[in-house]
Image: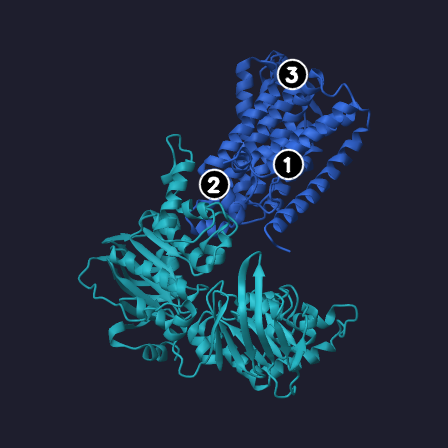
Chain colours: A blue, B cyan
């Protein structure tokens, strides 16, 4: 096998095209401003991207299974709230590491429980994931705003700075968390029975059931895991912003969907890999940071993201046509 | 050359060839359909039938040198629009209808679109639609949503739409592939009605009995070449099968007496409300038990109860002597039961996914490594073992299973289930959409599996299939077993008379 075939086999055909895109974006911004290709900018990018990245992982698997999880932001918020509540109980800024561990566990539990509820309804009631997760999103938002009266909760212990702003071997901690999560996702989807079932269910859940797969159990697990990675994102947000507020990161919801589609995830489920999605995330972050550096308005970068997706779709279409023609079609 | 339009053939093709990138899909084929004739186009998958139809309907341009004559008029070129204007209609297998529109809207569709729609969306067009349906002599409610109709009636709608466009030559691509026997009979009646009104029908079908029944003549293609044109009078199914495959097909009773072997499956008085009642049967090691019954006889419902997809209300299922109750299909698989569904497209295989994934899906636990992760090497070994074992013709194991022909897809289904090392294999209509040559291949595998000791329940609605491949035949009707036959002691016409009575 050539290197190209090996990359395609391991990571999906999208990878090379997105790598090329990434190079173009990096070269273009490096030419536009000397500030882009600097350690400071790259570090700042590496601090900013992980929250979006973790939330995108939470969105990715439900989409692969033919569903969607609209509740991810508020699942992250509620999980952050669970952590904050434990920390406040143990004295806020004076809370010990044990309290953080307990709080993080409760946060994961909150994420898993909200996910499990969605999964059970999707799997056993047969309701569409869009409806179920929309209901969960509205429920969690209401619950969170009720509990916090719409305000911030802040005043966390200093050691949380290590997670939010620290580095290990020069790599920002949030980035390490994200890379580990992405690796776990890659292995889960490519090598685990659960991952295999996700793809099969995404293409045809009935045939998957007739083939003996645990389709319902898999669906529940998909949303439990999605909720847990939301909790990790929520903990990271609390550490980075030193506060928790319901509604934090709301604007990221559709960006996670955008990142999935840019990364070649089939909107109808059944096909897609992790690595192209990670590349798409890096491209989105680079576009955003780069435009910021050359002094463009923040809103412009949102517009560029949208155009970028349209551009990628057009290129994919051209690529398909080219491959088809090469095979002798008309 | 122009002949008198009244006596000229509806269609005459001479010397038609079509090459796709070096591959000759058709080579110097002649084809003629007389006006008002029912003509069958027969051949295995890939023989060039579809290419021929696509040339006549203007989808493909033939290689230079071809002569096409329609109702006596020579034509230089055909485009899809021109073909329709000349009265050629094709009813593809997928029917190309709109499930959310009504029957009337579907039938009048071609008149409703275009630059100058000939009918309005008011109610006036309905009279014309009704007239067409009256010509076909079928009662259909014009206002029913198409999606609510069974496939058989959607076929009728597709035919009516062709008549609305004043078609004089109708191509039907495997119209009976997903119909039951009685539905097929009524469709064939409609085809006869068309023919009696002077409309020529070209009929493509894998079911040879039907071809001989409905057509006056049959044109056989093999590997893109014309084998010949034959009258169906005096033609037998086995002769036609030989012409299509170019090989001798064994069509003889192969039943053996297995009554001394130990029983694998014993069912006693099994019932499930509205589905089947008091069903008792035994299948022994190495036995192929044929279960023949029409759709709605409870045959598939019985199979579903045997694999844990539904729970019986009363009665007992014993597997190798022990009573069993399956809570799910996974229970059944774990106990050695495998089920090849009648619906390969939506239940049997996950069509967009790869051949490899569709093969290992039932035995994931067997391809795990020490860490509990799926080992790519074990997967590919298992896949290549079964591809070789069953002689499945594939490109790459990574290709989507939908790229395979019906026969090869069915082999992948068999591979998936044989990998679970079952003791009881339930085959529900295993040859739907599989062509003649490939059918023989599948039944060779079935016979070999039985000889190796597997107990097999062969469910079918084709008499020849159970007669030639089963050791015993049970007849199921209205949820009950109503008769048992020894293939050696009965004949195809005799059994047909009892089942289709």
In the image, which is nearer the foreground, mark 3 or mark 2? 2
Measured along the vertical axis of the image, is residue A76 above or below residue B226?
above
Q: Which residue is drawn at 68% across and 37% down?
A: A254
Q: Do labels 2 and 1 touch, CB within 8 Å? A: no
Q: Mark 1 lies on which chain?
A: A
Quarter holding residue B264: bottom left
- Residue A7 in picture, x, y percent from top left: 54, 34
First along the sequence among labels 1 and 3: 1
Residue highlighted by disc 1: A17
The front one of A13 and B495 is A13
Instruction: Output the chain of dot 2.
Output: A
Instruction: Residue A165: give its label.
Output: 3
Q: Do the residues labelled 3 and 2 touch (CB within 8 Å)?
A: no
Give percent across and percent down for residue A73: 65, 33
Query: Could one spot residue B332 in this view of the protein?
Result: no
Image side of residue B337 versus residue B295, left or right: left
* N-term mark: 3 or 2: 3
């Amino acid at each position: 096998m050539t290197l190209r075939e090996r990359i395609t086999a391991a990571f999906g055909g999208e990878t090379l095209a997105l790598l090329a895109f990434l190079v173009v974006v990096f070269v273009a911004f490096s030419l536009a401003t000397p500030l882009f290709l600097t350690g400071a900018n790259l570090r700042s990018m590496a601090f900013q991207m992980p929250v979006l990245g973790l939330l995108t992982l939470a969105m990715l698997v439900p989409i692969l299974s033919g569903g969607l999880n609209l509740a991810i932001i508020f699942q992250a918020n509620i999980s952050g709230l669970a952590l904050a509540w434990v920390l406040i109980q143990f004295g806020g800024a004076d809370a010990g590491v044990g309290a953080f561990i307990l709080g993080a566990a409760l946060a994961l539990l909150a994420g898993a429980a909200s996910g499990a509820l969605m999964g059970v309804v999707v799997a056993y009631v047969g309701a569409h994931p869009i409806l179920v997760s929309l209901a969960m999103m509205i429920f969690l938002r209401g619950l969170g705003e009720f509990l916090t009266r719409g305000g911030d909760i802040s005043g966390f212990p200093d050691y949380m700075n290590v997670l939010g702003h620290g580095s290990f071997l020069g790599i920002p901690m949030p980035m390490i968390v994200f890379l580990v999560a992405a690796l776990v996702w890659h292995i889960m989807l490519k090598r685990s029975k659960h991952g295999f079932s996700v793809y099969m269910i995404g293409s045809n859940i009935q045939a998957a059931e007739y083939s003996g797969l645990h389709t319902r159990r898999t669906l529940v697990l998909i949303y439990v895991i999605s909720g847990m990675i939301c909790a990790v994102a929520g903990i990271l947000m609390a550490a980075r912003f030193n506060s928790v507020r319901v509604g934090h990161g709301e604007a990221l919801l559709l960006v996670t969907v955008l990142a999935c589609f840019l990364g070649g995830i089939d909107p109808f489920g059944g096909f897609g890999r992790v690595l192209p999605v990670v590349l798409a995330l890096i491209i989105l972050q680079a576009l955003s940071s780069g435009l910021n550096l050359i002094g463009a308005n923040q809103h412009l970068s949102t517009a560029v993201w949208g155009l970028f997706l349209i551009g990628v779709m057009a290129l994919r279409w051209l690529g398909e046509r080219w491959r088809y023609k090469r095979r002798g079609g008309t | 050359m122009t002949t008198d339009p009244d006596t000229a053939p509806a269609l005459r093709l001479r010397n038609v060839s079509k090459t796709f990138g070096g591959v000759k899909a058709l080579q110097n084929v002649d084809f003629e359909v007389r006006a008002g004739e029912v003509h069958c186009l027969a051949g295995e998958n890939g023989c060039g039938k579809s290419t021929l139809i696509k040339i006549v309907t203007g989808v493909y341009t033939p290689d230079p040198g071809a002569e096409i004559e329609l109702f006596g008029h020579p034509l230089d070129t055909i485009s899809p629009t021109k073909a329709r204007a000349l009265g050629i209609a094709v009813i593809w297998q997928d029917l190309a209808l709109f499930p959310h529109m009504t029957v009337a809207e579907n039938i009048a569709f071609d008149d409703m679109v275009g630059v100058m729609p000939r009918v309005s969306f008011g109610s006036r067009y309905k009279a014309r639609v009704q007239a067409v349906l009256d010509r076909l002599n079928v009662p259909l409610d014009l206002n029913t949503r198409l999606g609510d109709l069974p496939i058989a009636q959607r076929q009728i709608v597709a035919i009516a739409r062709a008549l609305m466009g004043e078609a004089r030559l109708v191509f039907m691509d495997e119209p009976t592939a997903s119909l039951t026997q009685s539905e097929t009979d009524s469709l064939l009646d409609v085809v006869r009605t068309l023919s009696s009104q002077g409309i020529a029908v070209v009929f493509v079908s894998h079911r040879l009995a039907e071809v001989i029944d409905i057509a006056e003549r049959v044109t056989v293609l093999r590997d893109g070449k014309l084998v010949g044109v034959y009258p169906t009078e005096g033609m037998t199914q086995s002769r036609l099968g030989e012409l299509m495959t170019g090989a001798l097909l064994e069509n003889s009773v192969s039943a053996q007496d297995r009554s001394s072997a130990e029983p694998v499956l014993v069912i006693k008085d099994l019932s499930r409300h509205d589905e089947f009642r008091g069903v008792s049967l035994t299948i022994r090691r190495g036995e192929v038990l044929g279960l023949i019954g029409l759709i709605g006889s409870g045959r598939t419902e019985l199979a579903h109860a045997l694999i844990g997809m539904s729970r019986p209300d009363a009665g007992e299922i014993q597997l190798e002597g022990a009573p069993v109750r399956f809570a799910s299909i996974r229970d059944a698989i774990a106990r050695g039961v495998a089920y090849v569904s009648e619906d390969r497209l939506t239940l049997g295989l996950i069509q967009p996914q790869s051949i490899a994934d569709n093969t290992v899906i039932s035995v994931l636990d067997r391809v795990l490594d020490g860490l509990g992760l799926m080992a790519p090497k074990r997967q590919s070994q298992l896949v290549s073992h079964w591809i070789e074992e069953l002689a499945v013709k594939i490109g790459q194991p990574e290709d989507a299973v939908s790229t395979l022909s019906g026969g090869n897809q069915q082999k992948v289904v068999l591979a998936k289930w044989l990998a679970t090392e079952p003791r009881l294999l339930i085959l529900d209509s295993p040859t739907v959409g599989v062509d003649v040559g490939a059918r023989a291949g599948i039944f060779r595998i079935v016979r070999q599996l039985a000889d190796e000791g597997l107990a097999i329940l062969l469910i079918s609605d084709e008499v020849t299939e159970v007669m030639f491949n089963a050791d015993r035949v049970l007849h199921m009707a209205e949820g009950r077993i109503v008769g048992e036959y020894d293939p050696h002691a009965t004949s195809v016409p005799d059994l047909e008379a009892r089942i289709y009575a």
